[in-house]
Amino acid sequence: MNVGNPVEPFETVEDIIRFLKEQWAGLFQRLLATTSREFESKLIGDIKTSSETLRSLVNVLLNEKNPKQVNDILMLHHPAFEAIKKVAGISYRVIFYNLEELTQLLSARAYNLDDISSPKDFYDFDNHKLLKCIRVSKDIFDSKGKLKVMTPADWRSELVTVITINPPSDDDDDDDIPF
């Protein structure tokens, strides 16, 4: 007698069809699981390789004692860029290196710097049409208005936030009445 070979008695053709459907379903499920694991394994391998490459690049840059190159790389991937892109609804890559460039970028999207009512430690960029204010912490800029180098680990979500602006009251419209 053969060991490990299942024996299934059949009484009708329907029993054979049912049995084959169950067998094929099980085989197909195993194939899908195996394929999925192979894809995940390859993806993990690719991530590991990329991680090792990045680690090597960082080590080379740090060993060369050239902090300017490291700062340039960090600046190109500054977390403020993604934060501004998100809150302003910008679909393309955002880069600015100082407060003036940020002001120009947001001004092109109808956000105006509000020097008068901005809180002490923030720059407020108001868009009265959208009734929205983008509040940017002064902590991301140095004393000259230049963007400070920051890593994602240094970033805090409260450095760039969105605030709803109250709509103008009816009293504010008095100047618009011609009589």
Image: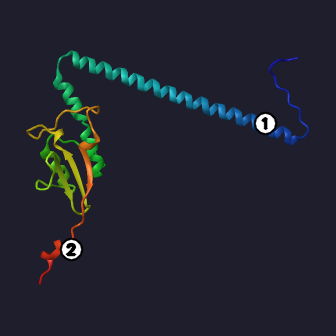
Find out whether the residues at labels 2 and 1 contact each other: C-beta distance under 8 Å: no
Could you say where residue 93 lies in the image, as x and y percent from the top left?
A: 27, 43
- Of badges 2 and 1, nearer the viewer stands 2
Residue at 25% over, 17% down: 60
Placement of 37 over or under 120, stated as above or below: above
Which residue reaches farthest left? 144
Q: What element carries label 1?
A: helix
* Gap between marks 2 and 1 measured at Cα: 76 Å
Q: Report the residue marked by disc 2.
A: 170
Mark 1: few/some/many CA within 10 Å (<14, 14-19, 20+): few
Between disc 2 and disc 1, whose residue precedes? 1
Q: Dividing the image into 4 quarters, which one contains the C terminus?
A: bottom left
Three-letter code for the amino acid on which mark 1 is drawn: Leu
Residue at 51% over, 29% down: 40
Res 174 quadrant in image: bottom left
Q: Is mark 2 on a helix, strand or loop?
A: helix
Could you say where residue 147 lies in the image, as x and y percent from the top left?
A: 16, 38
Which residue reaches farthest right? 11
Mark 2: few/some/many CA within 10 Å (<14, 14-19, 20+): few
Q: Report the residue marked by disc 1.
A: 20
